[in-house]
Structure formats: structure tokens, C-alpha cells
């Protein structure tokens, strides 16, 4: 049995029975990291000594009769989430040597539950991106095809889960940064409702949409992690006290569940095979008893432009604070951080961070605030109202997570607009603060389009098409690339979206497929 391939639920049951130990489980994950991370580059920091010590403590807790879903379960943490005594770089040279003096609230809760932290994962610098190519420490590679991106910005976390380096990982989602990489890597990614899990201890990107959440192997595992990390936090005034989601809630049938399918999420230009896979998944939900209802969200087309006005505006403000950043530190700790910052500052921000800072500063400047930022906030309100109206008529929404599958590293690096359009199906739920989950729903072989050679023969010319379709050769040879189904729910109704996700998983095998490395 390869212990690193277990789900949280499977491992927890074996730990409860005494058939395995946390130390064995942790060693299996560390061995997997050593074996393949030189190819994938998902981890920025690995804490082998500390992880083994935490595993031994977890085993002693179990020997005393303590039980818990995450007690002794190894995980990885996105490197923009603070972890006491461990580097927290946000994948930026500016914070290359910054060691966090305290734990983020979500990390503190994981530790209290007995989770074993293996290390920190790669991301787009300060979480700015949809590919994990913007990291100052180099890109992460998709385990399904090493020539391709894992999605972003939580690409390191998603790639690590897909490659069985850990049993789960934490990511953050601002405008799709958990769901996009989950879709590209064939794993489960849950963006909780804004306010369900604390942002305290996150290196902030966009304060009004940032939310930490789990990346897991199954929907049930995502529910387990969410139940631990969510809840009211005195250090984050935006958090809300919400009841824990019980397993009974997510184990219910979806028979009679009203599932809205917005027509605006199936658009011209999306990859045809992706559309077919998602529609097949929606048909499966219908077969399982869901009632499929066509709906319309006409303001969807404005979600990306609104997001890319509001997001850079908040980024420019948040990153400006790095000159005197405190994170709630003592005066001595703040001075130490300031010294690290100024030593590293000459290395500067990466190009995407600079681009967003400049865009945000421009939008917020005198003469442009009303024309851009204020208007964007008004349209955001309309988007929120539209979601609320539609979700009063249906229980959940089913959509594609992304219009395409993982693209090649470097393919969109010089075209920011194409990169920003990767967020087209995920930014709306973020702007509205709604919960959304991405689950695997199919695999495809992408098609490459090449121009045909001109043929001077008139008859041949009449017959020939201007483009030639060829299936792309993937490095994994046989598996294809994952496709994600996104399920969006009402605010703080994570139980219903996970209920639908779990039942879909029970009826399909997509989440069980693994990349060949």
C-alpha cells in the first residue's frame, strides 16, 4: 500500500484502527516529494525534521485515545499563508528570507487538529496569476504533462495533491486561484464563502475577495478540512460564525435538487472538448436526480473587467503597506521584518506584480477613481444581485471551471489579456463572495490547429480547409488532460455544493485517475 496515495478519510480510518502510524504516513509523503519534486517543483520549502516531530506527537496523542479527522494527516501550505518559524515568501524575492513569527489562523487550527505540515508550496508571486509561472523561484509543472502549467495562483498546492506528495493542501482563492489549478491538475478545489475562513495571517492580495480553502483528492476530504479551518476569528472582522457542516448533510441524495445552468458560461471560443465534458457531467447530475434548469446571468461578461479593476486597486494598496508591514507583530519583530524587506527590496517585484500595482495606482488616481473604480464597484453590486436572484430560484449552479485545459508553459506569458481571460468562469463567484468547488469531470486530448499548405490545384483548393486539426502529443502519453466542473452555491451553503460534488464522485471515476510520473 502506497500510503501517500490515500485520501484523508482512508488514512484517518487506518490511523484509528492502529493499522498505520502518522510517522509512516509522513515518511511516505516526504519520500514522494524527494522522488518527484525535482520534476514538478511544487514545494518552495520542505520541513522534514519538523514534520517528523509533529507526526510523532500525533501518534502519541492517538496512543492516549485521542481521535480526529486530521490528527496525523500530512499536508502542504501555500507560501502566502504564514507558518510560525517557517519561511513565508509569497514566491517573491522581496520576502525571500522572511520567517513568519506566528501562524495564520487557518494554520493554527490545522495544528490544533493535529495535521502535520510538510512544507510550503509554490505560487504566482503574491498570488498574482493563473499559471504559477510568475513565481520568483521558477514555474511549477503540471503532473499530467510536465510541459504545461498547473494553473494558478495555488499551482504548487494543486500539483502536490495531484502527484500524491501530501494528502491535502491549503490554497487561497481571490478570483479562481484554488479552482483553476484544481481543474488543470484533476483534483478538488473548494473556495469557501467570503468570511467563512479567516484571512488573518494571509499575505493579502485583494482584501475583499481573498479566502483560504482546501485542495484535496475528494469532495468529502474538502468538507473535512473546511470544518476545521472555518469559523469566527477575533483577528478578522470579516469572519462569520457558521454551523459546522456534518457528514450527514453532504451524504444526502441530490434527488430533486434544482441545478441552474447559466448559458453565459458556454461561450464561443471555449475548447470544444471541455464544453462536451462539462455538459456530460451536467447530464450525469440529471441522471442522479437533479433537476436541470437553464438560467441567465447576463452580467457575467463584465466579471473579468470588473475584477481586473478592483483587484489591482486593492493590490496597489496592500503591497504599498510592505514599507511598514506589521501583521500584528511586536515592535521588535516589525523591525526585523523591515530589515529583511529593505535588504531584499533591490531585487524588486516581478513583472506581473508591477503591472498590477501600476494598474491599481492609475485606477485610484485623481480623475480616474470615479470613471473606473467607482463604476466597477457599481457593476459588482449588480453581479451580486444577479447571483442572489438566480440562486433564489435554483439551489446550485453548474458551469465549467475553465474554458480550456492546462496550456503550455510560456504559451501565454507575453499576453496578459489572454491570461486574465482564464478567470472568466471563476471571477463572478469571487466578486459575489459565494462558495464554489471545482471537481474533475473528464479528460481530453487537446487539439492543435495548424495552417495547411497552399495547394495550387483548384479542385484540391475547393476541398481543403484553411486549418488542420492534430491531437497534441502529451508527455504522459495516455491519460489526457483533466477538465473541471464548477459548482457554485448560495452564500455559506457549502454543504449543498459539496453534496452535489460528492454524489457526482460516487457515480464517476474521474477523481481516481492519477498522472503517470
Image (tube, rainbow, N blue to C red):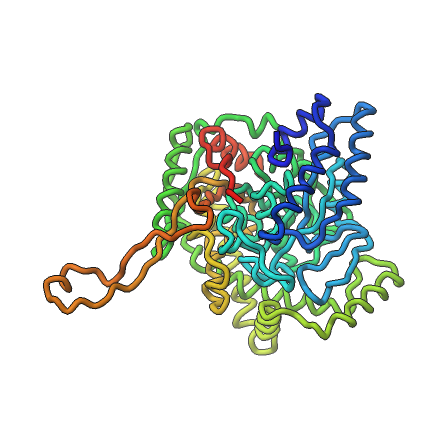
Q: Quadrant of residue 442?
A: top left
Q: Is 6 in front, or is 399?
A: 6
- Going by the picture, which residue comes out furthest to the top? 17
- Going by the picture, which residue comes out furthest to the bottom? 367
Q: Residue at x 46, y 56 (%)?
A: 407
Q: Quadrant of residue 283?
A: top left
Left or right side of 270 for 246: right
Residue 178 vertical position relative to residue 369 in the rendered view, above or below: above
Residue 360 vertical position relative to residue 167 in the rendered view, above or below: below
Left or right side of 242 for 133: left
Q: Is 509 in front, or is 112?
A: 509
Left or right side of 363 for 509: left
Quadrant in the picture for the N terminus = top right
Find residue 86 and report its horizontal and vertical position in percent.
78, 53
Find residue 470 and report its horizontal and vertical position in percent.
32, 54
Q: Is residue 431 visible?
A: no
Q: Is residue 219 visible?
A: yes
Find residue 256 and report its horizontal and vertical position in percent.
43, 28
Q: Is 379 in front, or is 419?
A: 419
Q: Residue at x 61, y 68 (%)?
A: 353
Q: Is 240 in front, or is 487?
A: 487
Find residue 211 and report its horizontal and vertical position in percent.
63, 50
- Going by the picture, which residue comes out furthest to the left? 459
Instruction: Count numbered badges in the picture.
Output: 0
Left or right side of 110 for 461: left
- Going by the picture, which residue comes out furthest to the right? 332
Amino acid at each position: 500500500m502506497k500510503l501517500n496515495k490515500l485520501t484523508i478519510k482512508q488514512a484517518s480510518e487506518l490511523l484509528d484502527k492502529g493499522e498505520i502510524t502518522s510517522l509512516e504516513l509522513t515518511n511516505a509523503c516526504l519520500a514522494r516529494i524527494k522522488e518527484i519534486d525535482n520534476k514538478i517543483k511544487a514545494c518552495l520549502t520542505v520541513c522534514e525534521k519538523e514534520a517528523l516531530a509533529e507526526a510523532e506527537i500525533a501518534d502519541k496523542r492517538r496512543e492516549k485515545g485521542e481521535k480526529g479527522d486530521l490528527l496525523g494527516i500530512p499536508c502542504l501550505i501555500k507560501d502566502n499563508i504564514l507558518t510560525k518559524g517557517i519561511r513565508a515568501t509569497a514566491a517573491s524575492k522581496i520576502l525571500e528570507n522572511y520567517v513568519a513569527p506566528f501562524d495564520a489562523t487557518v494554520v493554527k487550527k490545522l495544528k490544533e487538529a493535529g495535521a502535520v505540515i510538510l512544507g510550503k508550496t509554490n505560487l504566482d508571486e503574491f498570488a498574482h496569476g493563473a499559471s504559477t509561472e510568475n513565481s520568483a523561484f521558477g514555474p511549477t509543472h503540471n503532473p499530467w504533462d510536465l510541459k504545461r502549467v498547473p494553473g494558478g495562483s495555488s499551482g504548487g498546492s494543486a500539483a502536490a495533491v495531484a502527484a500524491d506528495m501530501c494528502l491535502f493542501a491549503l490554497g487561497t482563492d481571490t478570483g479562481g486561484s484554488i479552482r483553476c489549478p484544481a481543474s488543470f491538475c484533476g483534483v478538488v478545489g473548494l473556495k469557501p464563502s467570503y468570511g467563512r475562513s479567516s484571512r488573518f495571517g494571509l499575505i493579502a492580495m485583494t482584501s475583499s475577495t481573498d479566502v483560504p480553502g482546501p485542495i484535496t483528492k475528494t469532495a468529502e476530504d474538502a468538507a473535512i478540512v473546511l470544518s476545521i479551518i472555518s469559523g469566527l476569528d477575533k483577528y478578522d472582522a470579516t469572519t462569520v460564525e457558521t454551523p459546522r457542516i456534518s457528514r450527514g448533510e453532504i451524504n444526502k441524495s441530490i434527488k430533486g435538487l434544482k441545478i441552474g445552468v447559466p448559458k453565459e458560461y458556454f461561450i464561443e471560443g471555449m475548447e470544444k472538448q471541455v464544453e462536451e465534458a462539462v455538459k456530460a457531467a451536467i447530464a450525469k447530475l440529471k441522471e442522479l436526480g437533479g433537476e436541470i434548469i437553464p438560467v441567465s446571468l447576463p452580467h457575467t461578461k463584465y466579471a473579468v473587467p470588473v475584477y481586473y479593476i478592483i483587484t489591482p486597486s486593492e493590490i496597489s494598496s496592500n503591497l504599498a503597506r510592505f514599507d511598514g508591514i506589521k501583521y500584528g507583530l511586536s515592535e521588535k519583530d516589525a523591525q526585523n521584518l523591515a530589515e529583511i524587506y529593505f535588504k531584499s527590496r533591490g531585487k524588486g517585484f516581478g513583472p506581473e506584480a508591477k503591472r498590477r500595482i501600476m494598474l491599481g495606482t492609475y485606477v485610484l488616481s485623481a480623475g480616474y477613481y470615479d470613471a473606473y473604480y467607482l463604476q466597477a464597484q457599481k457593476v459588482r453590486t449588480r453581479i451580486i444581485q444577479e447571483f442572489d436572484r438566480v440562486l433564489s430560484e435554483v439551489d446550485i449552479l453548474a458551469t465549467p471551471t475553465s474554458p480550456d485545459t492546462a496550456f503550455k508553459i510560456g504559451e501565454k506569458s507575453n499576453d496578459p489579456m489572454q491570461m486574465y481571460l482564464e478567470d472568466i468562469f471563476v471571477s463572478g463567484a469571487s466578486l459575489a463572495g459565494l462558495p464554489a468547488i471545482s471537481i474533475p469531470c473528464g479528460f481530453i486530448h487537446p487539439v492543435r490547429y495548424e495552417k495547411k499548405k497552399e495547394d495550387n490545384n483548384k479542385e484540391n483548393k475547393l476541398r481543403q480547409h484553411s486549418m488542420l486539426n492534430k491531437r497534441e502529443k502529451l508527455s504522459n502519453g495516455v491519460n489526457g488532460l483533466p477538465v473541471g466542473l464548477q459548482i457554485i452555491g448560495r452564500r455559506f451553503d457549502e454543504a449543498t455544493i459539496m453534496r452535489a460534488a460528492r454524489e457526482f464522485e460516487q457515480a464517476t471515476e474521474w477523481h481516481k485517475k492519477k498522472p503517470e510520473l
